[in-house]
Amino acid sequence: MRPVGAGGTLSVDIKEKSFRSAEGVRLTALRGLSFQVPQGEFACLLGPSGCGKTTTLRILLGLDQDFSGSFHLPGEHQDRAVAVFQEPTLLPWRTVEQNVRLGIPKSRRDADLDQLFESLGLTEMRNLFPSELSLGLARRAALARAFASEPAMLFLDEPFASLDEQTADRLRLLLLGVWSARPTTALMVTHNLREALMLSDRIIVLTGRPAHVRGVFVVPMPRRHRDRTEMNELIRTFHLEYPDVG
Amino acid sequence: MKPEDGVAVGDPPRLTPARGGAASLVMPAATVAISLVGLGVLWAVAAAVWPSRAFPPPSDVWEVLLRDGASGELAYHLGMTLARVAASFLLAMLVGSVIGVVLGSPRRWVEFFDPWVILFLNIPALVIIVLAYIWFGLNEVAAVGAVAVNKIPNVIVTMREGARALDRRYSEMATIYRFGVLDRLRHVLLPQLQPYLAAASRSGIALIWKIVLVVELLGRSNGVGFQIYLSFQLFDVAAILAYTLAFVAVMLLIELLVVQPFERHATRWRRRNT
C-alpha cells in the first residue's frame, strides 16, 4: 500500500512488521514506526544494533512487502529510490564504470559521468573490476552508482561500516560533497552517533525492538560549521535529550 | 608434424630443466605432441608385430584420410555430423538451462518435477533414440531431438545447482535499480550461471557427439556414424579409425579455438585478482 499525497516528503507509517523464526516463534521487529523526512533533507535512523533499521529500509525499497502500514516516497515517480548497502554489491563481472552505468535508466545511460567519478576520486578506477578495489573504493563506486541514477530518494544502509575511522571520515566528506551538489532526500541507517551528527539534518532516534520512534533530534547547525569542537558540543546537546544513546 | 617437435622427440631429457623459463609456453604443446607421436609409434610397432586386417597400421588410416579427404567425402560426413552435434547441443543447452533455472528457483511446486528429471536421467540413450525414430519417423528432427533429449536432463541438473547458488543480493540490487529483463539476464543472471553453463557445455559436447554417432548409425544415411556403420559391414577398420580420428580432431579444434578462448573471455574478471 503506498497512498499518494504528501508531495516531496518521505512519510513512513509502518503499523507492524514481524518475522517468524525457524522455530515458529513470532518476532515483532517494528511496531507503530512513523516518521517524515522533508524533501531535500538528509536524515539518519539511529538505533541500537538489531532494532529493525535495515528491515525498515528493505520495506521502503520494496524488497519486503509483508508488513502492515503504508509509506510514501518523494518524487512524482515512485520508482526513483535507490540504495547503497553495507556491502557495495557491485557486479564482480562488470567494471566500475559498467556497474555505475547499469544503475542508470536506459534513456540516460550514456550520460557524462566524468564529474561524478572525479568528485569521488574514481577517475582512475573506471575500468577496474570490483575485485581489484579496496572496500573503501568499492563503497565509493556504490555511491557513484546511486548518485548517477539521479534518484528522488536515496537510502544508505551503514555505508561506512567496517572501515577504519580515517577512511570512513574521508568517505563521509565525499558523500557530503556529492550530496550537496545533487540535493536528494536521503535516509541513512546507522548506529554511529558521531556519523549521524556529522551528516544529517535530523536524526530519528529509534527504540530497541520492536522499533518505533523515540524522538527526533534536529541538528541545530549548518554542516560546514560542524568541526571537531562543535561536534563535541553537538554530542553533548544530543546526550542531554538521549543520555543512553550512542 | 613440425620439425621443432621432431627435435624435441629426439631429446626428451632436456625438457625438465627447461621448464618454467621462456619455454614455458612451448613446453605443454611439445609435451602433447611427443605424447601423441609416442602413441602413434607404439601403434605402428604393434601393427607391425601383429599384422592383421582388424588392426591396420597408422599409414593405412592416413591413406584413407587422404583418399576421402580428396574426394570430399570426409568433409561431407564430418559436416553432417558436426551440424547435428551443433543443433542438438544448442537445443539441449537452451531447453535444459531454462528448465534447470526454473527448477532451481526456491518454489514449492518445482519439487513435483524432481522425480521426472531422475527418470529421464536414467533412460538409456538407445531407448530414447529408438522411440524417437518409431514415434517421429526416420528423419532429421527425430535424430536431433533424440540426442537433445538425452542431454537435457544433465543440463537441467547442472543448471539447477547453478540457480540454487544464485546470490540474492545481486537480484535485489537489480530490483532496486530497476534493471530491465534483458539487463537482468545479461548482467546479473548469466554471469552467475557461467561456470555451470561451462560445465554443462563441456560435458555436453563430449556426450552429444558420441550419441549423434549412434543416431546416425541407426537411422541416417550420412554422417560419421553412418560411415562407421558402413565400414563395419565392410570390415574396413582403417576407415573406422580414420573417421573417428578426423572427428576427434575437429572436436579438439573446437575446444581449443572456440570453447577455451570464450571461457577465458568470460572469466577475465576473476583472473585479474591474482
Image: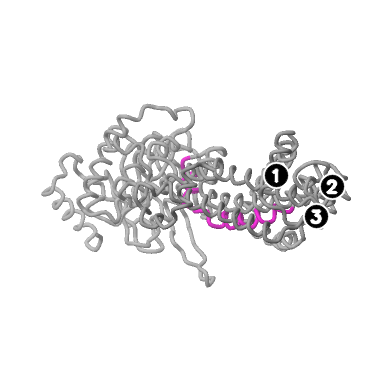
Tell me the chain of label 3: B
State the image quarter where residue A116 is shown: top left
Could you tell me how many numbered marks the image carries?
3
- Where is residue B142 shown, x and y percent of the image? 81, 45
Amino acid type at mark 1: Val
On the same chain, marks 2 and 1? The answer is yes
Looking at the rendered image, the disc whose residue lies closer to the viewer, 2 or 3, is: 2
Front residue of B179/A205: it is B179
Front residue of A19/B244: it is B244
- Where is residue B174 shown, x and y percent of the image? 49, 44
Q: Disc 3 or 1, which lies upstream in sequence? A: 1
SS category of the residue bearing label 2? helix
Q: Which residue is mark 1?
A: B85
Looking at the rendered image, the disc whose residue lies closer to the viewer, 3 or 1, is: 1
Picture residue at 33% right of the left edge, 52% below the top:
A158
- Label 2 – label 3 distance at C-alpha: 13 Å
Q: Disc 2 or 1, which lies upstream in sequence? A: 1
Task: Answer yes or no: is residue B151 visible.
Answer: yes
Mark carried by residue B219: 2
Amino acid type at mark 3: Ile
- Label 3 – label 1 distance at C-alpha: 16 Å
Task: Answer yes or no: is residue A39 visible.
Answer: no
SS category of the residue bearing label 3? helix
Magenta stretch holds residue B166: yes
Q: Which residue is mark 3?
A: B128
Picture residue at 20% right of the left edge, 44% below the top:
A220
* Residue occupying the far bottom of the picture: A23
Q: Which residues are magenta?
A: B150-177
- Where is residue B39 shown, x and y percent of the image? 59, 56
